[in-house]
Image (cartoon, helix red, strand yellow):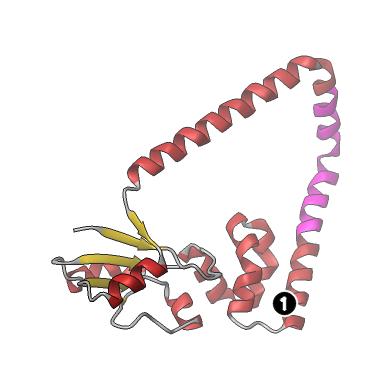
Amino acid sequence: MTDYSLSHSTAWLAFSPSTEEVFVHRGPCALLFAKFLPGLSTAAPPLAGMFRIRLPAFLAWDAAGAVLWLAAYGGLGFLFSDQLERVAQLALQLGEGLVYLLAVALAGYIAYKYLERQRFLRQLRIARITPLELQRKLEAGENIVVVDLRSSAAFEAEPEKLPGALHMSPEELEQRHQEIPRDRDIVLYCT
């Protein structure tokens, strides 16, 4: 049996369930602290559109978040300005040695990330199928099970599903896995 992961060809954005859930639970006020959270800062504008937040509300919350972010980091810079001057003087004393130290640290970080990515790719042994390939297989009558694993927030935003697809959120997969037939190919569909 082959497992397939379907990557949607249209303009879907991949949001982690936790990022979506923060936005679902907090609504537009999530924009207030979105700039402080790396995943949420990128996902917040598309999620605001997906959940049909009105433009004036989006602009107000986003502007308030920008002011809060600026005040927080500006305030920290002001509070620790003496320490920053000491760090700058130390960097001048180290001179060229600091450049080499930073270059080695950057090279080590890049090597670590590269090895981490290679390990992840080795662990990820899932065949991929395009939407067009899936459509051809379904039209040809191949015996395929499509499991729609979109989160509840993504499903509410766009409730259409592929004909015959079995919908369950990723959180339900462990409890409902017995509903997935094991005697045919399985296509897992998510955003």
Q: Is residue 109 above or below residue 148?
A: above
| Residue position for label 1 | 58
Q: Residue at x 69, y 60 (%)?
A: 35
The one of 68 and 18 positioned closer to us in this rendering: 18
Res. 7 image quadrant? bottom left
- The answer, for residue 148, to whether it is visible in the render is no
> Residue 65: x percent and y percent?
74, 66
Q: Is residue 95 above or below residue 24?
A: above
Q: Residue at x 54, y 69 (%)?
A: 22
The one of 14 and 86 positioned closer to us in this rendering: 14
Q: Is residue 129 above or below residue 81?
A: below
Q: Residue at x 47, y 75 (%)?
A: 154
Could you tell me which quadrant the N terminus lies in? Answer: bottom left
The one of 130 and 17 positioned closer to us in this rendering: 130
Q: Amino acid at mark 1?
A: Phe
* Label 1 secondary element: helix
- Specify the segment rendered in magenta: 69-89
Main secondary structure found in the magenta portion: helix
Q: Is residue 87 magenta?
A: yes
- The answer, for residue 175, to whether it is visible in the render is yes
Q: Dot 1, how many residues are within 10 Å of its Cα: few (below 14), some (14-19), or many (20+)?
A: some
Res. 86 image quadrant? top right
Q: Is residue 77 magenta?
A: yes
The one of 97 and 167 positioned closer to us in this rendering: 167
> Residue 187: x percent and y percent?
30, 66
